[in-house]
Image (cartoon, rainbow, N blue to C red):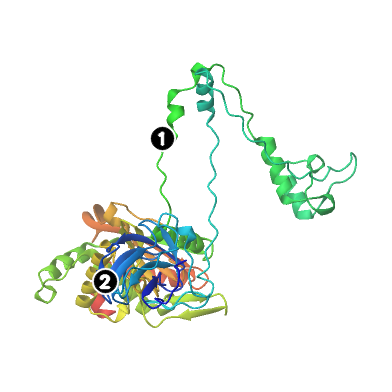
Amino acid sequence: MTARTADDQRFREFKMPDVGEGLTEAEILKWYVAVGDTVADGQVVCEVETAKAAVELPIPFDGVVHELRFPEGTTVDVGQVIISVDTRPGAGPAAPEQSAPAAAPAAAEPEEPQGRQAVLVGYGAAPSSTKRRARKQQVVPAQPVAAAIQAELNGSAAVAPAPAPAAEKPAPAAPAGARPLAKPPVRKLAKDLGVDLASVVPSGADGIVTREDVHAAASAATAPVAEEPAAVAEVPAAVTDLAARETRIPVKGVRKATAQAMVASAFTAPHVTEFVTVDVTRTMKLVQKLKDDPDMAGLRVNPLLLVAKAFLVAIKRNPDVNASWDEANQEIVRKDYVNLGIAAATPRGLIVPNIKDAGARTLPELSTALSELVATAREGKTSPAAMSGGTVTITNVGVFGVDTGTPILNPGESAILAVGAIKLQPWVHKGKVKPRQVTTLALSFDHRLVDGELGSKVLADTAAVLENPQRLITWG
């Protein structure tokens, strides 16, 4: 902790703010200042990555950088001091610091009492967000078998492993002839797994066999018996350096948040996916005409733009699809606005920013919003606000040459449309087989609030607009 003296107001500390909505930590990607640099109010001092996006942090006061508390690459809790500034650098030498060096971030603690912290963006940290989480202890892996054999060949002494701590003595198995104690579900599990309950050592209270006991017995019965190598010479040399040929990538930031969100979505919302293959030849011709239209000059016109417009028309015709499930109140919340998410692949992982009130935008306005969204995402500058509040999403897997897929819903959203590659294929058109531009659409939806009829209508209407884009006028 920094020593406090009469110069208390001289040194000011800047804490990691909650740069999103309720985020608890962020990784320092890059420092833009160093110790001794002069900084001004509003100057960006570092870039951090949260679970949602990369964000630049401006400092809220003037002075000279006195200390950087954490090095680049460190994940810091919201509320932790990350930089201290000397606001009166000409007032004489600074008091000695009592803080831990930058290389040991675990020693740094917030100096203010627990409570709501002032933030630059978002709603602030939770009351307990200034408390440091316990660090996980690193487990040192055991020496590989092949390495131990090689050490024996070289005449080196093998290091005996430390004795394992004595395990608690399990409850004795049921006496011979006695019926083992177990609940009916556990008995059924044992029967399904082919485990004899009489042979299972119980660990439950009063000698009751638990589900864990049954699983352990089943695993022990099916575990392969390790065989000793016939000869040391048969151990392939490649086995000894397999670890050196593996790369471990920490899962954090956007990738970590995406993984958690997809797991939560897949196992919370009952997904249904429907598919339709459609002739989009007329839409592709319209794309070319719009590129030559003076009203679209300078704007990016591509098939995704018309797919987005077709999807918005289908939602307007079937508004009940644009909703969310309120688990706490057991209600379906229908939205009278469409915040259209566009899945974007970035160097930091997949993110889904959304166009606010996309259904109310004209085609030129929608084109401008799409272009800005994609450009900002590729630069890694998408704000947390741009990724919150989405209602439906489009993911364009066709850019990778993929025909279709079964997309997973963004948490809190009702539907996601996957657009496949547009390819020239033989197609029956006006009674004759002709080469036509064809694509496949896939719509996944939350079956709690979107039934099969509603989901089918949305997908069919989207396909109908793309097959005959004049419906953008008649239906729109």
- In the rendered image, residue 224, in percent from the top left (x then y), is placed at 63, 31
Q: From where the camera sits, is residue 359 visible?
A: yes
Pick the front one: 84 or 284: 84
Give the class, few, some or many, for how many residues have Cα within 10 Å of label 2's Cα (few <14, many ≥20).
many
Q: From where the camera sits, is residue 407 visible?
A: no
Residue shown at the point (46%, 28%) measured from the top left: 239
- Residue behind mark 1: 244
Tell me which amino acid carries mark 2: Val
312 lies left or right of 173: left
Pick the front one: 449 or 183: 183
- In the rendered image, residue 59, in percent from the top left (x then y), is placed at 32, 73
- In the rendered image, residue 200, in percent from the top left (x then y), is placed at 78, 42
Pick the front one: 279 or 144: 144
Residue shown at the point (26%, 80%) measured from the top left: 361
Q: Quadrant of residue 380?
A: bottom left
Name above or below for residue 230 compared with residue 345: above
Q: Which mark is residue 410?
A: none
- In the rendered image, residue 178, in percent from the top left (x then y), is placed at 90, 44
Tell me which amino acid carries mark 1: Ala
- Residue behind mark 2: 39
